[in-house]
Amino acid sequence: MESQIAEIAQHTGGVIGLSWLMIAFPLVGAFVLLVFGRFTNRWGHLLGVAMSLASFAVAVLGFFELIGFGEEERRRAVHLYEFIPGMVDMGLLIDPLSISFALLITGVGSLIHIYSIGYMSHDEHRRRFFAYLNLFVAAMLLLVLADNYVGLFIGWEGVGLASYLLIGFWQFKPSAAVAAKKAFVVNRVGDFGLLVGMFVIWTTFGTLTFQGLGEQITPGTENGTMLAIGLLLLLGACGKSAQLPLQSWLLDAMEGPTPVSALIHAATMVTAGVYLVVRSGAFFFPEGSGAALAVAVVGAATLLAGAIIGCAKDDIKKGLAGSTMSQIGYMMLGAGLGPAGYAFAIGHLITHGFFKADLFLGAGSVMHGMNDEVDMRKYGGLRKFMPVTFATFFIGYLAIIGFPLLSGYFTKDGIIETAVHHQPILGWLAVLGAGITGFYMSRMVFMTFFGQKRWADDAHPHESPSVMTVPLMVLSLGALGLGAYLVLSNRLMLFLAPAVGRPEELPAFHFTSTPGLATLALVAVGAAFAWMRYGRAEVPSVQPRGSFLTTFARRDLYGDALNESLFMRPGQWLTRIAVFFDNRGIDGLVNGLAAGIGGSSGRLRRIQTGFARTYALSILIGAALLTGALLLVGNI
């Protein structure tokens, strides 16, 4: 695979030479808003939006400059400075893969910034919120633009910090504070895998730059080492992208403001794991390695788990969170198929960024008009009161279920068809997941916008202001046609080839393939069942008891209970044992020794009477004993 990837050329001129500005703009915005504090309250949100838009402008100009080069020259290195003398130089890698992510992060991220002006208009800490948004964008851009694993890891940790700050932004809510800590801790588990993987890479190859590794990795590289590196990197990817078994933080992350949910779940944080796998493809695809299969299996298992969870959530944001978990599973499945699946995985990542941001921000618009109510059982019939929100949300809904000719139809069906060809069992599981997606997303739309109204008498649903609805319109345009543009004629696959390699045979999208027709049939069945259950009759306002499967899904497949049983409880007992050993063992030994010395000194002190006659008698007795001993020795 590496032989098919173009060499990296040094580049210091033009817009690409200034690509570091993509990171600098939002970083400066975060610095100004945090350091100058309340003095920026009146215009801080405008600065945050301007910095994100400036970064987007640089990304667009860099993209057009990049496509002006020949295919073999579309990998440009931008050296910044020597980071660790003699070991790591900090630089940026501008290639089709990184620029695609940069466009998505800055483009969708800017729309979320604009939307946040209206959504957070009544929050007294809005300026600080925009500072955190800028910090998040800057860290994510460093992650995808760095030309080595050290820079990637710094951005990786920066994203973790920013997500902690944003998820727990409303820290006065105990649930938000707990969710932020949970996300931080769970991600540290994955970060440990990435860090150890970097150690093994350095020990084995002596470099952490993508260019240096591309020169050293050959088909004869030790498979055992490559497998170990691949599995460690996969662990890191599972943490950031909320894949099994490190998915438990994702649904709780909904405690943050809705723009945070859109930013984390659509265009930034959860896509980092997919980027890591694709960028590190050489470690997953040496001949005979099982690391690629592990990626595909994790993706297939997660897409089913997320879909099942989404079926039982009444909280509109948590239902969308389960959907994100499932859709990232599709991307991981595609990434586990190698160059044949890379373009579909990245294509689905890009289109998902648009329609999932559209759905999350649409959910925020519904909440805005419903006094922050998130329970879909208290919605109903809202399409009449929120026509723009309904129209844009419905487009996102059609895209995510794979309605023909919309974005998700091309990218998700591309992953499914490729998977059925290379890994048939996993591919047909993905078909099943698509059917479940048709059910839970239809359930969400019907409960929210159709049926009888079920809201309280004091609720007055209304459409959101234009600063919130215009971003929804722009995102819905991407949900409509972007997939067809990327997939047909293999545009994205050919564009990404210099960075990720080209498959041996370019696939053609089949509108009437067996997996595709089966997918559409199951989606239609799922949507019809959702209509029968939730569309025609009034949804009960009281949560039904449900079956075991319903309870299983409502409790997130008992993921938290499993983590508690396997890790938290044993950790508590180990802590108690350690405390007991410390108190009774280490402290006991120290305290016992101190007590022994204290007691002995107390007893010895008794012979110090303070009387001269006692000391004289002691001297006399000692002299007599010494004299006797000398005489005895002399006679011997």
Image (cartoon, helix red, strand yellow):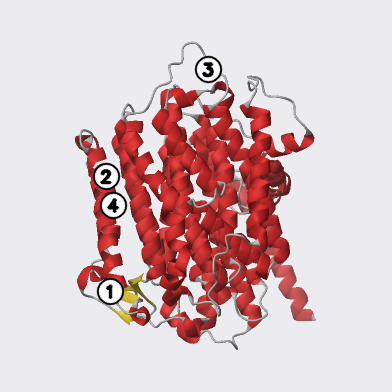
Most foreground residue, 19 or 80:
19
Judge the density around disc 2: few (<14), some (14-19), many (≥20) Cα neighbours within 10 Å.
many
Given this view, does label 1 or label 3 mark the residue nearer the observer?
A: 1
* Amino acid on which the number 3 mark rests in the picture: Trp
Badge 4 marks a residue whose secondary structure is: helix
Q: Earlier in the sequence, mark 3 or mark 2?
A: 2
Q: Is residue 332 visible?
A: no
- Which residue lies under the disc numbered 1? 68
Q: Which mark is residue 26?
A: 4
Q: Which of disc 4 and disc 3 is earlier in sequence?
A: 4
Q: Secondary structure at mark 1?
A: loop
Query: What is the secondary structure assignment of the residue under circle 2?
Result: helix
Note whether residue 383 is visible. yes
Q: Quadrant of residue 482?
A: bottom left
624 to 118, vertically: above or below: below
Q: Amino acid at mark 2?
A: Val
Q: Eyeballing the image, is 181 above or below 302? A: above
